[in-house]
Amino acid sequence: MPEGHTLHRLARDLAELVGSEVSATSPQGRFPAEKVDGLRPTGVDAYGKHLLVDFADGVSVHVHLGMRGKWLRFAPVTGPGLPQVRLRLSSPAVAWDLIAPSTCELLDAAGRAKLVGGLGPDPLRTDSDPEEAYRRVVAHHGSIAAALLDQSRIAGVGNVFRAEVLHAMRMPPTRPARSVAVAEFAVLWSRLQVLMRQGVEDGRIITVEAEDRSTVPEAESRRVYKRALCYDCGTPIVTGTIDGRTTYACPRCQPHWTE
Ligand SMILES: [Zn+2]
């Protein structure tokens, strides 16, 4: 599933439509594109794993990609878009086609505010308050791993960033969220910012050292996530399941937590 870096990169790229009068269509017929057809986007924003294309009059298109969704860019524009396209936003120069999202809906200003208000602070947003993220994470009754995936506590972290940042912090996934000290969380937050900002730049998640980041094979791009051996120390990676999601950790780098 795409994590926050994917949405922030898309928001940056889709911003090329801002200010232009866009044609909106739904070749698939499952989105009321006529409601925004001919309007000018005023901004494109990402909050965690959610993308918002804002138009004048407080109308927004809210997109969540889910497991399979993607945006495809076409420049120059050729043809009207394939029949599986949920939403096409196009200017004379470029078309952006949305395929297979889990959510693509119109929101009014109140709906937008409700969506954003339900999300925790996003490490990729400059308006996020890390102290608020800390309060929400330590209030979780379960593990730090579960708290990091709870989008209402911290937004944009998925399974890959979770595994990699916990490894970087030398924290086992099972450590109780409430045991994390404020100073530790400050480091965790800043590491997440570094990892996720790099992900926006790379267009993928690479946490290993690399001279040429464009040539790192997918299977060798992380330190613990889906690896057999820890990148740092060579110890076999241990997997587990927390709230139905697989955890990846190095038992040597991330020793068992005892209070
Ligand atoms: Zn290790």
Image (cartoon, rainbow, N blue to C red):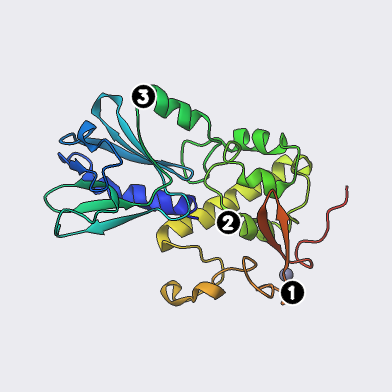
SS of the residue at dot 1? loop
Viewer-nearest of labels 3 and 2? Answer: 3
- CA distance separating discs 3 and 1: 50 Å
- Disc 1 under 8 Å from ligand 1? The reply is no
Q: Position of residue 27 (x, y in %)?
A: 23, 48
Mark 3 or mark 2: whose residue is earlier in sequence: 3
SS of the residue at dot 3? helix
Mark 3 or mark 1: whose residue is earlier in sequence: 3
Residue in the image at 40% along x and 22% along y = 110
Name the mark on residue 161.
2
Residue 21 higher or lower than 227, as above or below: above
Confirm or deny contact between disc 3 and disc 1 (CB under 8 A).
no
Q: Quadrant of residue 250?
A: bottom right
Position of 258 compared to 54: left or right? right
From the image, tell me which residue sits under label 3: 109
Mark 1: amino acid? Pro
- CA distance separating discs 3 and 2: 31 Å
Mark 2 or mark 1: whose residue is earlier in sequence: 2
Q: Mark 1 packing: few (<14 Cα in 10 Å), some, or many (20+)?
A: some
- CA distance separating discs 2 and 1: 19 Å
Residue in the image at 11% along x and 50% along y = 92
Q: Position of residue 153 (x, y in %)?
A: 61, 37
Mark 3: amino acid? Ala
Q: Quadrant of residue 162?
A: bottom right
Q: Position of residue 15 (x, y in %)?
A: 27, 46
Q: Mark 3 packing: few (<14 Cα in 10 Å), some, or many (20+)?
A: few
- Between 67 and 185, the residue placed more toward the observer is 67
Name the mark on residue 236.
1
